[in-house]
Amino acid sequence: MIKILDTTLREGEQTPGVYFDLHIKTAIAEMLDRIGVDIIEAGHPAVSVDIKNAIVQISSLGTKAKIGAHARSVKKDIDLALDCGVNFLGVFFCVADERLNHIDQNLHQAVDNISRIIAYAKEKKPGLKIRYTPEDTVRSKWENVISASAEAVRAGADIISVADTTGYMIPGTDRSFYTYIHRLRSELGKQNLFPLIAVHCHNDRGLALANALDSYRAGADIIDASVMGFGERAGIVDLASLLAVLHSDFDESSSWELDLLPDLYKCVSHYSGIPVPVHFPVTGKNAFTHCAGIHTQAALKNPIHYQSLSPGLFGRQTEITLDHMSGRATIAYALEKIGIQCPSNELIYSVLAKVKEVGRLGRTVDLDELKYIVRLLNPNQYPEFLL
Ligand code: HCA
Ligand code: CU
């Protein structure tokens, strides 16, 4: 079964301007745990004392999810992470030739450093799950990635993460995760090494989720995601979209509490100051809202005509909205919703005309406003006490 790593609190906090206070971080971690993610990457303790304190706090919550710290391949970072009491550690170090030249290291020195650091962490805390990420994996020289990954596993790493740090991969091409993961497994397998494979897909080309699913098809064990796909630049995979597809289309974990996603998104959105885009899959305001007259008419008979995901699964419901796209059936339905049974054609069409007029101003009409419209047009049919 696939494992999900949520990194809203680490990668997500690298979104420009985003900072979650200690109590907010704790609340987010608790919600993620209830939803059922397997690993919560809680932060990079070397960044600041308050981030370190938050990781300590989150590690002490007693979550089912493993709590992870992020660390460079340096002893100081490992000590800080271990001080936090985490049971998951992500060590990253780029082994691309260009990066190694930059820091005046050769591959041999880099690999030696990575394996020493990993062995050190494993020795200090034998139960610790360790992930090694050759940052910018997919654009790094293949031989370098293999050599660093193999030595990392020999030194005690349990997981190798394939990072598409710049969102470079494209499914179905010679830059696909599907091929990469098969090759990586096979190459490490030849050396009798069988780590779990994680994937970290950035969204620079808008393909993060597609790449994550390509990896899933190739048998990846862990997929990274974050709330709203928060992260550096265009971010990474959106957690809710990923869970929705894995659950609805690939029969993955029925124990995920997907109906808690709206609360999580509300919280993250509120405290990051970044609204969930209205058209966002699953969690956006309009994700299950039908608007155009023809759509609404069909969806009212049976939502399946214009819905392939079930809103109830995500604590949502099918909604209709009224604007310049509305038709007769939508208005009749909305009038019944506000208590007017069997509205006359005359009322329906006069309301429709007013709704379209408001819609042309670039607004929608909610049920409260609909009451005001009816009252104005037809005070007798819509008595005051209903207001
Ligand atoms: C970073 C880069 C990273 C690391 C991923 C990982 C990436 O912000 O440090 O350590 O698994 O995209 O490569 O997020
Ligand atoms: Cu990243």
Image: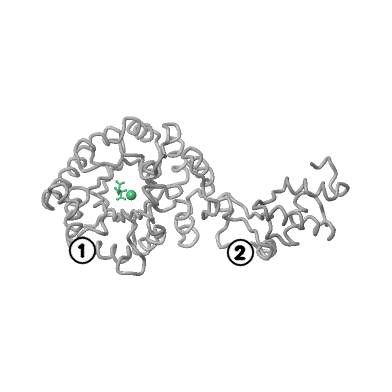
Q: Position of residue 364 (x, y in %)?
A: 67, 51
Q: Does residue 148 appear to the left or right of 276 in the view shown? A: left
Q: Which mark is residue 306?
A: 2
Vertically, is 24 above or below 222? above
Report x, y in % for residue 298.
67, 65
Separation (CA) of disc 2 from disc 1: 45 Å
Q: Secondary structure at mark 2?
A: helix
> x, y percentage for residue 339?
79, 49
The residue at the point 19 percent across, 38 percent down is: 75
In the picture, measured across the screen, residue 291 lies left or right of residue 344, that is left
Q: Quadrant of the N terminus?
A: bottom left
Labels 2 & 1 near each other (Cβ < 8 A): no
Three-letter code for the amino acid on which mark 1 is drawn: Glu
Number of other residues with Cα within 10 Å of mark 2, as a class: few under 14, some 14 to 19, many 20 or more: some
Tell me the kind of residue under disc 2: Tyr
Give the left or right position of residue 45, taking residue 113 as reference: right
Q: Secondary structure at mark 1?
A: helix
Can you identify the residue that label 1 sits on?
A: 187
Looking at the image, which residue sits at the far right?
A: 380
Is 84 left or right of 4, judged from the image as shown? left
Residue 199 tag number: none
